[in-house]
Image (tube, rainbow, N blue to C red):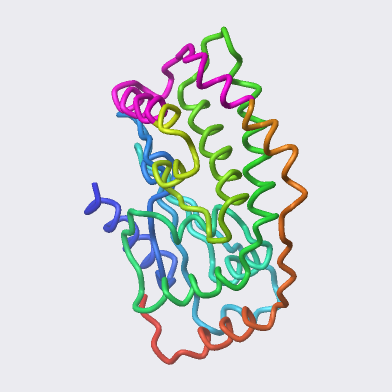
């Protein structure tokens, strides 16, 4: 599948006349809890030639491609830098992905340095907290629920908990988010990961009740602690400087 993905990325680059800067896997495969029928959620970052950005007309800054079990989406470099100013979580996660399909020389390291500058624990916390609340409605004790929904909720809860304990960027993979749990909870979670690996995305599950009770306590803890977070008010200067330098590079590879 890696070969197929890389071939499709190259074809998209040629067809759209863009330079590919970075491409990785996101979604359940990168998070560490895929099902056998999980899609491949490929995300990439690209740039145009310098003159493309000098036009006064508004232009599309994203690319979408769907085929079979491939879900491929690309964001333009300028769009990414503007999103980074807001500490956009999906963008930041891409640079934590354990599955990288392509990285232009030096680009991943450069962007991760920018992430370190613009990372806002508050913005990331409330992104995950709102997601956890959304999926909480779908996971009710005593009722069957999609195992997929449970994991989406769990991952966001654990990400919020990570932020309360750690100033570093939240890891993407579920198993790395288990650091601050007790062993019994982690054992249950990993058993469910193994179960999900054998079930389709549509699979419904019920329980385990002990984990659901622990989840409710986590919601209470997060609600009581969320006002303690730091806000990042870094200015645009570093992003402007990086963008201009990137556009002025003499090398442009299609």
Residue shown at 38% from the left, 66% from the top: 13
Q: Is residue 235 left or right of residue 132?
A: right
Q: Position of residue 244 (x, y in %)?
A: 58, 86
Q: Position of residue 50 (x, y in %)?
A: 54, 84
In the displayed structure, would residue 121 be above or below residue 137? below
In the displayed structure, would residue 77 be above or below residue 213? below
Q: Examine the structure image and report whether residue 15 is included in the region drawn in magenta.
A: no
In the displayed structure, would residue 239 be above or below residue 68? below
| Observer-nearest of 99 and 155 | 155
Q: Give the image quarter of residue 78.
A: bottom right
Q: Position of residue 54 (x, y in %)?
A: 64, 82
Residue shown at 62% from the left, 34% from the top: 132
Q: Examine the structure image and report whether residue 198 is included in the region drawn in magenta.
A: yes
| Observer-nearest of 132 and 103 | 132
Q: Residue furthest top?
A: 142
| Observer-nearest of 28 and 104 | 28
Q: Give the image quarter of residue 82.
A: bottom right
Give the mark count.
0
The C terminus is located in which quarter?
A: bottom left
Q: Position of residue 55 (x, y in %)?
A: 65, 79
Predominant SS along the magenta part: helix
In the displayed structure, would residue 103 be above or below residue 235? above
Q: Which residues are magenta?
A: 187-216
Residue shown at 39% from the left, 42% from the top: 175
């Amino acid at each position: 599948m890696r070969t197929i993905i890389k071939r499709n990325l190259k074809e998209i680059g040629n067809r759209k006349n863009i330079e590919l800067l970075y491409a990785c896997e996101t979604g359940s495969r990168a998070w560490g809890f895929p099902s056998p029928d999980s899609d491949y959620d490929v995300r990439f970052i690209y740039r145009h030639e310098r003159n493309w950005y000098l036009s006064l007309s508004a232009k599309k800054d994203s690319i979408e491609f769907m085929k079979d079990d491939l879900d491929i989406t690309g964001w333009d470099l300028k769009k990414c830098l503007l999103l980074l100013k807001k500490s956009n979580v999906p963008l930041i996660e891409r640079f934590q992905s354990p599955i990288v399909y392509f990285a232009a020389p030096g680009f991943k390291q450069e962007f991760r340095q920018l992430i370190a500058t613009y990372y806002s624990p508050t913005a990331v916390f409330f992104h995950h907290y709102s997601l956890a609340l959304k999926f909480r409605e779908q996971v009710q004790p005593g009722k069957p629920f999609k195992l997929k929904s449970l994991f989406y909720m769990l991952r966001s809860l654990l990400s919020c908990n990570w932020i309360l304990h750690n100033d570093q960027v939240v890891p993407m993979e579920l198993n790395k988010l288990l650091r601050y749990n007790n062993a019994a909870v982690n054992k249950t979670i990993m058993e469910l990961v193994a179960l999900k690996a054998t079930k389709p995305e549509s699979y419904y599950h019920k329980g385990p009740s002990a984990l659901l009770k622990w989840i409710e306590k986590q919601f209470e803890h997060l609600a009581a602690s969320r006002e303690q977070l730091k806000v990042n008010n870094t200015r645009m200067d570093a992003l402007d400087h990086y963008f201009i330098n990137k556009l002025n590079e003499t090398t442009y590879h299609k």
